[in-house]
Image (tube, helix red, strand yellow):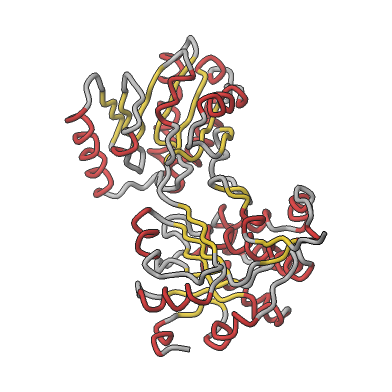
């Protein structure tokens, strides 16, 4: 092990395990060993009283419980001919604390030993999950060889060494992060999965919205957006309205959301300044727009057309563009490669899917109901993550 590895902090595992991880045999897809580890981890997390303070942690724990994993396994074919590719080196994002565990779970179920670099931000969610992993290691010591969770300051030397050890590199982060990490070369047979800067939007049928429980809808939209300060790639930044009663629906929708935001959301002063700056930059280059500012916590910018450059002026912490239409095909300019998730309320999802297929757009990887954009899934950004991390053993 190189000298600079002394700069690594181990949340799970140690230097000896990291040194030898390249020699650990891969396992079959959905191997009993990996599943039993995850079942034990789910139970251990839920035993921790601290987990109840973090809905994302408990959601993850329920996601890896036995009943759910067994249901997910049924969706895959040729499991008996699939096994892990080798060491999976994950670089987790700094804006979604539990993401590292989702990436880890996919790789383990694919049969791969994992090295996971988590953010240097001190998220309590990360601590809770890592503490639970270490407790499960005490009962299942053989699993220790399959997992190292680490932190280190930005170091091209360490990243290069870990990259040279891996068979799969998974990068979660912005475009700048991906560019920086790619300065570290990979072995010839290694593959890479990247999850870059993306944006998402919502489509709401006003008439159908007016039939819903307004508070429940506000709670769902709040979860999609303010829960992660709108920094998650799946968080809507644009809201497209359709239907006859748009004016009435918008008034109720935003008023109900504003009341919730005022009670529950903590906005940093710098975020308010950034939002105003983003609006000014947008206004300087676009006509026929209107700023509807409820409070510093909620900015709405009414626009008269959807253009592919809107995402260049996006912001977070309650910053939304709004557009009204009776023709859903108006959304096509938003469906560029960076577009990730389309959430909907009162819309037939097949109508959205058919637009994506008709125009052959390079964007839009998910179509889900409002309130579900943050749901955990093994399919993300167009990847079937478990399958992508396996290799197929072919027999004639």
Left/right of residue 380 with respect to residue 30 in the rendered view: left
- At which x and y percent is residue 345? 55, 26
Which quadrant would the C terminus be assigned to in this image?
A: bottom right
- At which x and y percent is residue 395? 81, 61
Q: Is 189 or 61 nearer to us in this picture?
A: 189
Residue 245 visible from this viewpoint: yes
- Compared with 189, 379 (above or below) is above
Residue 47 visible from this viewpoint: no
Q: Which of the 4 image quadrants contains residue 373?
A: top right
Left/right of residue 100 with respect to residue 120 in the rendered view: right
- Compared with 67, 339 (above or below) is above
Tell me the residue at 36%/67% (across/down). 183
Left/right of residue 21 with respect to residue 340 in the rendered view: right
Q: How many marks?
A: 0
Work out which residue is located at the far top of the displayed protein and give it: 244
- At which x and y percent is residue 83? 72, 65
Work out which residue is located at the far left of the displayed protein and give it: 284
- Compared with 162, 179 (above or below) is above
Tell me the residue at 74%/55% (across/down). 69
Q: Which of the 4 image quadrants contains residue 173?
A: bottom left
Tell me the residue at 36%/24% (across/down). 306
Tell me the residue at 45%/80% (across/down). 9
Q: Is 190 or 178 nearer to us in this picture?
A: 190
């Amino acid at each position: 092990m190189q000298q600079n590895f002394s700069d690594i902090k181990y949340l799970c595992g140690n230097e000896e395990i990291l040194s030898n991880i390249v020699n650990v045999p891969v396992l079959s897809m959905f191997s009993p060993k990996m599943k039993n580890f995850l079942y034990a981890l789910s139970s251990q997390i839920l035993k921790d009283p601290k987990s109840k303070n973090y809905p994302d942690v408990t959601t993850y724990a329920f996601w890896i419980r036995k009943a759910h994993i067994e249901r997910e396994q049924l969706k895959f074919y040729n499991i008996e001919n699939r096994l892990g590719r080798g060491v999976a080196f994950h670089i987790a994002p700094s804006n979604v604390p539990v993401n590292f565990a989702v990436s880890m779970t996919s790789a383990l179920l694919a049969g791969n030993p994992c090295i996971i670099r988590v953010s240097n931000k001190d998220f309590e969610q990360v601590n809770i999950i890592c503490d639970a992993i270490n407790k499960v290691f005490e009962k299942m010591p053989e699993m220790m060889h399959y997992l190292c969770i680490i932190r280190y300051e930005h170091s091209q030397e360490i990243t290069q060494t870990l990259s040279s050890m891996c068979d799969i590199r998974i990068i979660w982060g912005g475009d700048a992060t991906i560019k920086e990490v790619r300065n570290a070369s990979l072995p010839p047979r290694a593959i890479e999965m990247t999850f870059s800067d993306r944006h998402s939007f919502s489509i709401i049928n006003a008439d159908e919205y007016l039939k819903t429980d307004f508070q429940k809808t506000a709670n769902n939209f709040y979860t999609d957006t303010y829960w992660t300060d709108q920094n998650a790639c799946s968080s809507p930044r644009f809201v497209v309205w359709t239907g006859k009663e748009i004016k009435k629906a918008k008034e109720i929708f935003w008023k109900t959301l504003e009341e919730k935001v005022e009670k529950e959301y903590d906005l940093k002063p710098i975020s308010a300044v950034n939002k105003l700056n983003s609006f000014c930059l947008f206004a300087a280059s676009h006509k026929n727009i209107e700023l509807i500012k409820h409070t510093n916590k909620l900015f709405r910018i009414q626009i008269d057309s959807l253009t592919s450059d809107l995402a260049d002026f996006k912001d977070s912490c309650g910053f939304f563009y709004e557009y009204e239409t009776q023709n859903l095909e108006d959304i096509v300019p938003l469906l560029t490669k960076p577009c990730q998730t389309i959430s909907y309320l009162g819309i037939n999802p097949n109508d959205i899917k058919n637009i994506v297929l008709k125009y052959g757009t390079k964007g839009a990887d998910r179509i889900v109901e409002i309130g579900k954009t943050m749901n955990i899934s093994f399919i993300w950004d167009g990847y079937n993550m478990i399958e992508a991390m396996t290799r197929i053993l072919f027999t004639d």
